[in-house]
Image (tube, grey):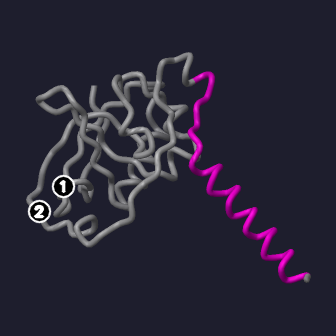
Amino acid sequence: MHSSRFFLIVSCCALLLIILVGCGLNTSQGAANNQTCSKESTAASTTQDTDFTGNQITLEGWLFDQMSSDSTKKPETKTKECLTMPEMESSGYGILVKQTEGEYKFYRFDAAGHQAAKKLLSKTVKTKDITIKVTGTLNQAKTAIKILTIEESN
């Protein structure tokens, strides 16, 4: 009898966690600033995600979090405050690059690049529109970049 109650309690807690993780994050301050602070799920890594064997490339764009990268229309409105929220930071940082068609493409940073982005965020005086220039190697799937250099641009 006790083990079935325990199982029921654990199952309910797991279900609650799944529901909470699946819910969006929308802060009133973020909405007031017209910025995107939405919470998106991320896909599991594959070999293509971690195989950084491409040619060296330099990209210019906005420092961004993976969680908000799919829903942005105005990356220049993304604030430092939003980027440093635990949920945004834990989703992973990367660079959001405007494509020729006017759409945006997000390149996730490798672990060292994520740490470099955190350091850049802690030092920048900008409160929004944090533009960067990164040099590195793309992964095989062209969704992530292994950072060699990262710098703030104007």
What's the residue at 39%, 59% (across, down)? Answer: 43
- Residue 105, which numbered label? none
Q: Is residue 91 above or below residue 11?
A: above
Residue at the disc numbered 2: 54
First reached walking from the N terminus: tag 1 or tag 2:
2
Q: Main secondary structure of the magenta part?
A: helix
As for residue 105 lying within the magenta part, the answer is no
Which three-letter amino acid code belongs to the residue tagged 1? Lys
Q: The C terminus appears in which quarter of the rendering?
A: top left
Residue at the disc numbered 1: 142
Residue 103 in percent (x, y) is at 22, 30
- Give the side of residue 4 with respect to residue 104, left or right: right
Q: Is residue 125 above or below residue 21?
A: above
Q: Which residues are magenta?
A: 2-29
- Give the side of residue 87 with respect to residue 56, left or right: right
Q: Are marks 1 and 2 in contact (CB under 8 Å)?
A: yes
Q: Given the current orientation, which residue lies at the most extreme left position?
A: 55
Q: The N terminus appears in which quarter of the rendering?
A: bottom right
As for residue 14 lying within the magenta part, the answer is yes
In this view of the protein, which residue sits in the foreground, 32 or 120?
32
What's the residue at 33%, 54% (across, down)? Answer: 109
- Give the side of residue 26 with respect to residue 54, left or right: right
